[in-house]
Image: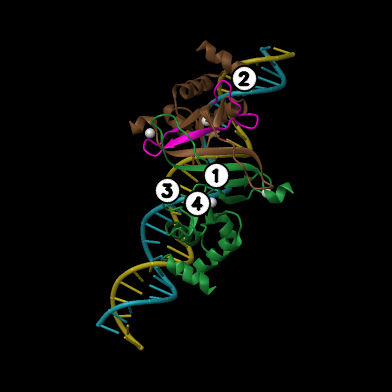
Chain colours: A brown, B green, C cyan, D yellow
Amino acid sequence: MDTIVIFLESKKVRPTAMRLLVYKYMAQSNVARTLGDIENAFAKADRTTLYRTLKTFEEKGIVHQVDDGTGTIKYALCEAGCNCDIGRDLHLHFHCNNCRETTCLTEHKIPQINLPDGYIAEDMNLVIKGICEHCSG
Amino acid sequence: MDTIVIFLESKKVRPTAMRLLVYKYMAQSNVARTLGDIENAFAKADRTTLYRTLKTFEEKGIVHQVDDGTGTIKYALCEAGCNCDIGRDLHLHFHCNNCRETTCLTEHKIPQINLPDGYIAEDMNLVIKGICEHCSG
DNA sequence: AAAAAAATGCACTTCTGTTGCATGGCAACT
DNA sequence: AGTTGCCATGCAACAGAAGTGCATTTTTTT
Ligand SMILES: [Mn+2]
Ligand SMILES: [Mn+2]
Ligand SMILES: [Zn+2]
Ligand SMILES: [Zn+2]
């Protein structure tokens, strides 16, 4: 617990009660979560506060957004050496068509892509949809 | 003009006036368009009709959705040999951070990705963001 | 303790996508 | 031609998520 406080402070984020709760929730999740997920997890908390908490976390490099194509933005904790701030960390994301959960495959980076002349890549997002390891067993 | 009628009929879509207009608009666009774009292009047309027109076009393999991460769905005409229906046509999409337009790079397919054990890929979406050929000149 | 800054909570707005239902137009059938 | 039925269209309303403004509370600083 204390270690989370120290971590948040190292990221220049004040460790309020709400932020600790959200961080713990994200840490215990092994999949990406929507604002709605978090809202449901803490029924008494206000959506705006959670929204701004995630925004703060994102700005400080604690979480990154995950756009898995479902239409609602998800969030996941950044790994230790995550490059989400500068140029983005180009790992891919997997969305399970069965359990509808989205996972960061942080070890799997997006391969080199060659583009037509004149196109300059700055960022990219690769989402794979299919059956996850839990559902394919 | 008549050729469009014949094309739509070959796709089992009745060539109504509205559908012809939408098709022509999509054909003259060389970038993906949102429902809102089309709505603005024909100010007098009803949003629902356009919405259902696109839905019909999509079901009949005339257009495919493009999810470029901007939060609003876009649509683009399918190419001649597009495999959007079965398993999807895995070409990549480019979103320009300058002009905000999204282009189908139909010649550029998503490369083979190897996944961790237990994960089964069924579909995928790769969006590259950066500067397009018109804006990089 | 007082002042300043930051976080929280409530209300409300916007935007996109979506559906229900009534109406209109076209086409096949009698 | 008249009737019937199907499909497209238009209007209205709804749902979900994202985002903003402002008042209030909590925390930090002086
Ligand atoms: Mn991720
Ligand atoms: Mn495309
Ligand atoms: Zn699964
Ligand atoms: Zn551009």
Say whether mark 2 and mark 3 are on the same chain. no
Farthest residue to the top: give it. Answer: A2
* Residue ID for mark 4: B65
Q: Is residue A60 visible?
A: yes
Please rate how many residues cluster around mark 1, counting C-alpha atoms within 10 Å: few if below 14, some from 14 to 19, many from 20: few
- Please, is residue A4 above or below residue B132 in the view? above
Q: Is mark 1 within 8 Å of ligand 2?
A: no
* Residue ID for mark 3: B87
Q: Secondary structure at mark 4?
A: strand
Q: Earlier in the sequence, mark 1 or mark 4?
A: 4
> Could you tell me the amino acid type at mark 1?
Gly
What is the C-alpha distance between the residues marked 4 and 2? 39 Å
Residue B16 within the segment the image draws in magenta: no
Residue beneath the point at 45% across and 32% down: B115
- Please, is residue B41 above or below residue B137 in the view? below
> Could you tell me the amino acid type at mark 3?
Gly
* Residue ID for mark 2: A11
Residue beneath the point at 41% across and 29% down: B117
